[in-house]
Image (spheres, rainbow, N blue to C red):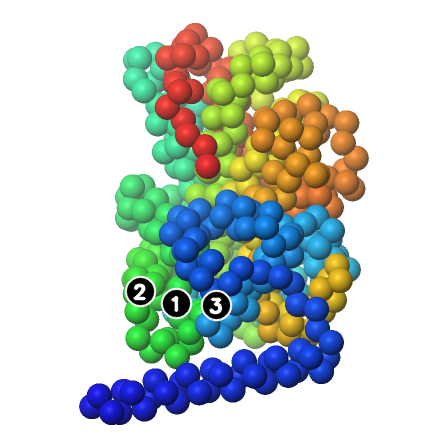
Amino acid sequence: MDTVVSTMLLLIMLACTLKLIHLHARSRKLNYKLPPGPSILTIIRNSLELYKKPQQTMAKLAKVYGPIMRFKIGQATTIIISSTDATKEILQTHNTLFADRTNPDITTAYNHNNYSLVFLPVSPLWQELRKICHGNLFSTKTLDSSQDLRHKKLHELLGDIRQSSLKGETVDVGRATFMACINFLSYTFVSEDFVPSVGDGEYKHIVGTLLKATGTPNLVDYFPMLRMFDPQGIRRHTTDYIDKLFDVLDPLIENRMKMRRENDYATNNDMLDILLEISERSSEKIHKKQIKHLFLDLLVAGTDTTAYGLERTMSELMHNPEAMAKAKKELAETIGVGKVVEESDVARLPYLQAVIKESLRMHPPAPMLLPRRAKRDVQVCGYTIPQGAQVLINEWAIGRNPQVWDNAHVFSPERFLHSDIDTVLISFPIFSFLYFGINSQIIFCFNIYVNARVRSRSVREEDAVSSQCIQFD
């Protein structure tokens, strides 16, 4: 038995050695100039920090090895981008060459990578799903039609907060924000609240676990030969939690399909009705399984990350009383004391918009953008990014780069009051989302905080939140 194991290990090491020799010869032949990067020993020494806070650790390493940095672990080559110039080349100049995603092992749970709009390669299916999302789910018409729903959910939450403040009860801001996002998404998707099926605490645990698993370094991604063993159990646990979400979605979809077959059915005009209508016209465009996986993407991306962004914004305002005072003054002068802020009012609140942008700069909900894959060898800022390499953009590092931002570690909304929008988009990728029609949920959730402060103004600020107990990354 020992002889067999030793022989297998020897063959694996020999195969890896031959592969490295081949790559080295290929790089010399093609006159590669690969980005510099830490040695495997340096990576091992920093492994604990990389596991806990990857974006901060990679930002520190980038100060040593440069803003375009190469990580070589096992069979995987990863390029870490911490430069605005390189980001511009990848997202704009060479966008088609970096359009595909790498598929981490975790995405194979439930074959999610074969249905997910996020991880599908550029293909007819991907183009069709993207067309459906842009033309139907996230169109201006659809977002406008759901404004009354957002307004209703906002007022329901404000009523709960007001009752708690009148009773002198402490409000769990994180839970309130999370629940508001869930309620908005669930009613937007299926016109009903599906959280009672699992409970809000359990739902938050499920989403939080999926997000944590997504950001956890997985040995299988670096050593594919370990895939059959799933040594960390990441794929297995992810499958279990996706199964719990699908247990909620399956009966909702089945029941709606049954209702739609009845003659007296009146459409809800929610996302599920829109998708089923498209599916009934042509099942080749989208079918039930794809609908479930699309909802999975939207649910996970639209709840915890939005709640995180809002909590960080609130925390920064509590830490910066001058910014808080300016925001409150703008609200009082523009909207009026005690009045509810509507979505249409946001355009008249430039300082409030600057507060949101500054918070996103310092605390991006997705500090490392989703991984991209180089379709072929690409020259970026004088370096060669090899074919098949995974590319990660460290948005956290870009947002705190002192060469781009004055006083980068200081919360200063004023920096965005007179900024050229093209410069902002190039410097910080997350702002592209704010200017391409999908910021309604951010505004909706921020309204929770703005209106809660307006409606509960009788509660002293120091009683509402203690800024001393809030810690930042």
* 379 and 317: which is toward the camera: 379
Instruction: Say few, some or many: other residues with alpha carbon within 10 Å of mark 1 (under 14 / 14 to 19 / 20 or more).
Output: some
Q: Position of residue 238 (x, y in %)?
A: 34, 61
Kindly identify the residue that appears in the image at 41 percent across and 59 percent down: 44
Rendered location of residue 203, percent (x, y): 33, 47
- Considering the image in quadrants, where does the N terminus appear? bottom left
User: Could you tell me which residue is drawn at 40 percent across and 20 percent down?
Assistant: 468
Q: What residue does disc 2 label?
A: 232
Which residue ends up furthest to the left in the rendered image? 1
Q: Secondary structure at mark 1?
A: helix
Q: Nearer the viewer, residue 188 or 390?
A: 390
| Residue of label 3 | 73
Residue 150 seen by the camera: no
Q: Secondary structure at mark 2?
A: loop
- Tags 2 and 1 touching, CB below 8 Å: yes
Q: In screen coordinates, is 125 left or right of 88?
A: left
Of marks 3 and 2, which one's residue comes earlier in the chain? 3
The disc, 1 or 3, on the residue closer to the chain's N-terminal end is 3
* Distance from the alpha carbon under mark 1 to that under mark 3: 9 Å
> Disc 2 or 1, which lies upstream in sequence?
1
Count of numbered circles on the image: 3
The mark lying in front, picked from 1 and 3, is 3
